[in-house]
Amino acid sequence: MMKKIIQQLTSSNRVLLASHVNPDGDAIGALLATGIGLEKLGCEVVLYNESAIPAVYRFLPSVDNIQKQLTDLERFDTAVILDCGDLSRVGSAADSIATIPVIINIDHHTTNTRFGQYHLVDVDACATSEIVYRLIQAMGIEMDTAMATAIYTGILTDTGSFRFSNTNQAAFSTCEAMVAMGVKPSTVAQHVYGTYSLGRIKLLNLALDSIEISNNGHFSIMTVTREMLADTGTQPEDADGLINYARRIQDVKVAALIHELENGNGPSDGRKRFHVSLRSDGSVDVSRIASDFGGGGHAGAAGFSVVSSLTELKRTIYSLSDGFCGTCHLN
Ligand code: AMP
Ligand code: MN
Ligand code: MN
């Protein structure tokens, strides 16, 4: 598959690169590294992400090349979709992107649907950025510090700073190679984890205060409402990583972060749109829970979106905790 993908990319004139809505460090890192790499081959590339790039990732090289709008779709030979378990994860442009003649799917989600003609899907990879590094090497593209910074950031953030269960040998060996290319771990860490606004820290305070635990102590729920964002002057991106606090509690197997979304054209009957992030301690496969709700992800980290009332949603999530020990175990 790798060979065919390389053939396809080297024979393309204009390539669209896209990653998932509300991008994390891996979605952005993989996008930038692939973009810089293909440009070195003389390819015309367009980098696309529907959402704004979170402030903590705006230090990344070439980040200003990422576009929020797509034009001249008919002029693309190939689309490379990065860090997306299914094509709809790119957002509202999914149907238009589906018309591009060849789609290459590069990803590491267990729930990947194998969309597109070519797949480079490795569910054991720590991050899509690591798969991108392998592709760049296989293509003989010379690495530089800009690409290395993007790949390092992707792996650092997707492994939760080398703490989550996807942290494997390749996470370290790839990052070691990136450091050898000139990446400064402390500089990246300072940008990603050390430049929070005061509002973001205040939001942490409200989010910690919202934590509730199920009767059996195995399930925690944290809630971030639009009101909390308004009160602290923060953006949805400022809720990134908050769920890890709910997961760290002793005996908690699964943590859920209920994130109220903008209502948009949503229902006017009191129900709201929510994104639910799930994290597990390793004993429960949360990607299965997320799939049941039309979402997806990994065994240890997954998510889905729903329209519901907050009370109803909490009740639904708590009722899941009864099912844990039966259907959702990893082994
Ligand atoms: P999050 O809920 O944003 O913390 O995401 C956790 C993991 O699940 C990430 O790898 C996401 O890419 C994935 N994920 C989140 N929401 C969805 C969704 N609606 N469909 C498929 N995968 C998702
Ligand atoms: Mn991602
Ligand atoms: Mn990823």
Image (cartoon, rainbow, N blue to C red):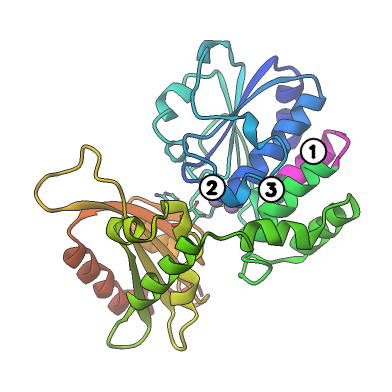
Please give the name of the residue rendered at 46% of the width and 84% of the height, measured from the top-left corner. Answer: 249
Cα distance in 3D space between marks 3 and 2: 18 Å
Q: Residue at x 15, y 44 (%)?
A: 267
Q: Within 8 Å: ligand 3 and the Cβ of disc 1? A: no
Residue 63, placed above or below residue 13: below
Horizontal and vertical percent position of residue 257: 38, 65
Please tell me whether mark 2 sits on a helix, a strand or a loop.
loop
Disc 3 within 8 angstroms of ligand 3 (CB): yes
The residue depicted at 67 percent of the width and 23 percent of the height is 45
Q: Would you say 115 lies left or right of 105 here?
A: left
**Picture disc at residue 54:** 2
- Residue 37 image position (x, y, % from top left): 77, 32
Q: Earlier in the sequence, mark 1 or mark 3?
A: 3
Q: Distance between the residues labelled 1 and 3?
A: 10 Å
CB of mark 2 near ligand 1 (< 8 Å): no
Q: Which of the 4 image quadrants contains residue 275?
A: bottom left
* Relative depth, front residue between 250 and 1: 250
Q: Mark 1 points at which residue?
A: 136
User: What amino acid does circle 1 point to?
Assistant: Ile
As rendered, which of 221 and 79 lies closer to the eye?
221
Region in magenta: 132-144
Amino acid type for the residue under numbered disc 3: Ser
Depth check, mark 1 against mark 2: the one in front is: 2
- For the residue pair 155 and 78, the one nearer the viewer reads as 155
Asked which secondary structure carries label 1, the reply is helix
Give the residue pinned by disc 3.
129
